Image (tube, rainbow, N blue to C red):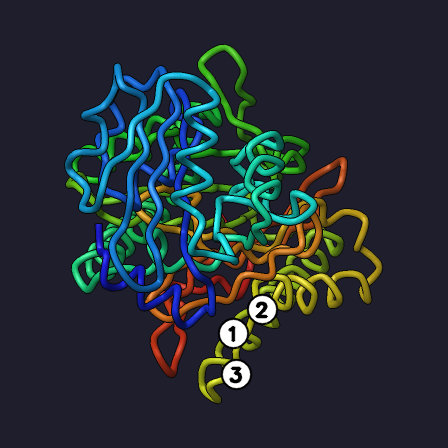
């Protein structure tokens, strides 16, 4: 736990304290921020408060009294619910504003982990509850130099595998044929050779399957790939070592030399929308302007809507990337949620607009890394459909 940095962040935020609370591992964020073992058996409620200034405090049940002993601060214990309420009220007595894993109106559900009853209890003590959303981004999504280096290491390897996968489609189509699942296996075998790992397998989607944003081929559900097919490859991975950061991309191509006018049109619309997002982020960081995730999504979505395909862009523009493929930093989202978290320096995220028609779908995905006064795309940028 980075106590000094947490307290400094609370002071910058103007909040009095950050209250962590868990029961049966409902809040994984608490364990990661506090550095608690996620394997710890938790059958009773525990509380830990970090003040903006001063000494933290713990409240634990007597039969699990040692659960928070690794953390600094005083300790109170309870058995009955009345004793819990009394001790919790006393622990929070010095504070007016209390930060919790809460998001008003469930606006950012990834953060909204505290149950409604606990919120009612804390408010009954006369406290104002603030969202921990931006604090969580700071302590969960800001990357170390080693993590940033691991992302670029994965990028170099995965970009090579992506190019090889499209070439392998062409080779196999012209020498007996292949399936989506074959290409998925080809990518995973390449990952194994390169020391890259992934929790979920990559996607190779053909024709109408590419119009399903979360399609995934399996051994029993997989289309054959032929001359004249439209192909989407979505792949992600990280180096096979602790705390390494994912690299996540999507490219599209056509088996042959003459994609349809509509396929070219949709690709160009999606490509240009992606570039709108890239330039929006770059401009903000170059000038020191604060920018939130929803603002990038709004700009990208406006471009696709103006071209007449807004209703076919059915997901957010991008997601936070850490050592998890979907991290806890700001997402580029003003559709599924209004993500008003600030995009922070030393964070990574995807920019991946898409248009999904019944016959085929196009997504163009790159990753960006931010610094204190700049932002960059971390890998290759697709500018034209791959002709396979």
Label count reads 3
Cα distance in 3D space between marks 2 and 1:
6 Å
Label 1: element kind: helix
Disc 3 to disc 1, how far (Cα)? 10 Å
Q: CB atoms at circles 2 and 1 under 8 Å apart?
A: yes
Task: Locate residue 291 relative to residue 344 in the image: left or right.
Answer: right
Q: Please state which of the two labelled residues, at mark 3 or mark 1, is closer to the viewer.
A: 3
In front: mark 3 or mark 2? 3
Q: Residue at x 38, y 44 (%)?
A: 91
Give the answer, above or below, for where 17 lies relative to 238.
below
Observer able to see residue 194? no
- Residue 199 location, x and y as percent? 34, 30
Q: Which of 19/168 is in front?
A: 19
Q: Residue at x 16, y 59 (%)?
A: 146
Residue at the extreme bottom of the image, as rendered: 287
State which tag comes first along the sequence, 3 or 2: 2
Distance from disc 3 to disc 2, alpha carbons, whole Å, reads: 15 Å
Q: Residues within 10 Å of mark 2 (few under 14, many from 20)?
A: many
In the drawing, does residue 93 fall left or right of residue 9?
right
> Label 1 belongs to which residue?
281
Residue 263 visible, this orientation? yes
In the depicted structure, whether residue 152 falls above or below residue 319 = below
Q: Position of residue 228 (x, y in %)?
A: 62, 39
| Residue bearing the label numbered 2 | 277
Disc number for residue 289: 3
Q: Are marks 3 and 2 in contact (CB under 8 Å)?
A: no
Q: Position of residue 310 (x, y in %)?
A: 79, 55
Q: Secondary structure at mark 3?
A: loop
């Amino acid at each position: 736990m980075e106590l000094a940095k947490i307290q400094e962040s609370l002071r910058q935020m103007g909040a009095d304290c950050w209250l962590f609370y868990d029961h049966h591992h409902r809040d994984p964020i608490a364990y990661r921020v506090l550095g608690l073992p996620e394997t710890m058996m938790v059958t009773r409620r525990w509380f830990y408060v970090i003040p903006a200034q001063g000494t933290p405090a713990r409240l634990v049940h007597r039969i699990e009294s040692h659960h928070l002993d690794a953390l600094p601060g005083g300790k109170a214990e309870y058995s009955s619910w009345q004793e819990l309420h009394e001790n919790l009220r006393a622990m929070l007595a010095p504070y007016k504003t209390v930060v919790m894993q809460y998001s008003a109106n469930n606006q950012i559900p990834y953060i909204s982990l505290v149950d409604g009853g606990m919120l009612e209890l804390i408010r009954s003590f006369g406290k104002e509850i603030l969202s921990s959303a931006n604090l969580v981004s700071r302590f969960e999504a800001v990357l170390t130099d080693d993590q940033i280096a691991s992302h670029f290491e994965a990028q170099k390897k995965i970009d090579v595998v992506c190019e090889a996968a499209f070439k392998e489609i062409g080779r196999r189509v012209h020498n007996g044929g292949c399936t989506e699942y074959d290409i998925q296996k080809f990518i995973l075998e390449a990952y194994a050779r390169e020391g890259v790992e992934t929790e979920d397998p990559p996607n190779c989607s053909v024709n109408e399957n590419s119009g399903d944003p979360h399609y995934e081929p399996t051994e029993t559900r997989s289309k054959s790939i032929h001359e004249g097919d439209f192909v989407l490859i979505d792949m992600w991975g990280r180096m096979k070592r602790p705390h390494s950061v994912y690299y996540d991309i999507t490219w599209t191509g056509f088996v042959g030399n003459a994609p349809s006018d509509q396929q070219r049109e949709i690709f160009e619309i999606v490509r240009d929308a992606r570039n709108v997002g890239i330039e929006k982020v770059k401009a903000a960081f170059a000038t020191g302007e604060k920018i939130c995730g929803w603002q990038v999504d709004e700009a990208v979505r406006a471009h696709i809507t103006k071209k007449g395909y807004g209703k076919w862009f059915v997901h957010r523009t991008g997601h936070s990337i850490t050592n998890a493929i979907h991290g806890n930093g700001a997402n580029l989202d003003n559709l599924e949620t209004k993500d008003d978290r600030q995009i922070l320096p030393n964070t990574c995220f995807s920019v991946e607009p898409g248009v999904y028609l019944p016959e085929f779908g196009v997504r163009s995905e790159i990753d960006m890394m931010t610094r204190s006064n700049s932002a960059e795309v971390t890998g290759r940028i697709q500018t034209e459909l791959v002709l396979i």
